Image (spheres, rainbow, N blue to C red):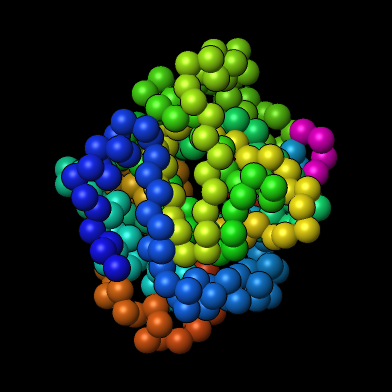
Amino acid sequence: MQYQLTHEEEQAYHRDGYLIKEHFFSEEETSLLYKLSLDEDVIGNSMDFNDQTGKRTRLTLWFTPGDDSFGLMSRSERMVNAVTALLGTDGKVCHFHSKVMQKEPKVGGAWEWHQDYGYWYKNGFLYPEAMISVMLALTEASKENGCLQVLKGSHKMQRFEHSFAGEQQGADIDFVNEAEKNCELVYVGLKPGDVLFFHSNILHRSAANTSEKSRWSIISAYNLSYNIPFREKNMSCIQPIVKVPDTALLESGAKKLVDADFLTKEKEITLHVK
Ligand SMILES: O=C(O)CCC(=O)C(=O)O
């Protein structure tokens, strides 16, 4: 498997605001992470965010990447090298947070149109270009079970105002309506093991999961070390990642996420990190 991004892939990311890399993690690696994501350490630390219709969507989020399997995935050489290729080398790659997104069959709610930087700006990060999210599909993601949707190229429009829609924050709907007229809407279907790199200013959303199939994924958010937030308390976002070899995830066997610095709902109200 060729993990290194090609020049064309880098260009596509900068043009479109997103990039899909198929089979970035093997079946064995992905199923190990999926099994762990059903563990009590993950589920027991989850938070619900209701969408506008009151449907529950659930996630578990933590900041510092450890030596558990999730940490070994987010610190793997292939991930950090790909993020470096997309964000550039003006700063060192740091891990802001990772979260296990748990969109349950029939229950999992929608995420409204937003930009990640619409949230992160409020934490006092100054440079959206230094931030990126990477989604790893743990189960298949399709239109039927509420896969991510993006407005291709919308990252070039810069940041829109965000305000509460249900328990989530959504981008100013008048701007979203205009963006929809200008950009192609793409449903990002993924197979387990595929990853999606997406720009912190790309408009994205997902519909509720009305199917019988779970839609589980891990999203790791990265930041470059020079982008020092003036309102953020968790400092993993400016601590350079200690990379681990790509083989570490499987060689270490299944390692649970214990004693992580999980985000709680009380903290989220002031931190806006989701
Ligand atoms: O996983 C999803 O459905 C939405 C996730 C998302 O929009 C985000 O994490 O910013």
Which sits in the foreground, 38 or 192? 192
Residue 75 placement: quadrant: bottom left
Question: Does residue 244 show up magenta in the picture?
Answer: no
Residue 51, position as x, y percentages in the image: 74, 38
Asked whether residue 118 appears in the rendered view, the answer is: no
Residue plotted at (37% across, 44% down): 19
Segment tinted magenta in the rendering:
52-56
Residue plotted at (19% across, 45% down): 7
Q: Main secondary structure of the magenta part?
A: loop
Residue 109, position as x, y percentages in the image: 74, 45
Asked whether residue 104 appears in the rendered view, the answer is: yes
Which sits in the foreground, 126 or 168? 168
Question: Does residue 55 show up magenta in the picture?
Answer: yes
Q: Is residue 265 left or right of residue 273?
A: right
- Compared with residue 2, is residue 226 higher up or lower down, i.e. above or below? above
- Compared with residue 118, is residue 161 higher up or lower down, i.e. above or below? above
Residue 16 placement: quadrant: top left
Q: Is residue 74 left or right of residue 217?
A: left
Residue plotted at (52% across, 64% down): 192
Q: Quadrant of the C terminus?
A: top right
Residue 181, position as x, y percentages in the image: 53, 15
Q: Is residue 54 left or right of residue 3?
A: right
Residue 23, position as x, y percentages in the image: 41, 63
Q: How many marks?
A: 0
- Compared with residue 6, is residue 111 higher up or lower down, i.e. above or below? above
Residue plotted at (60% across, 76% down): 35
Q: Quadrant of the N terminus?
A: bottom left
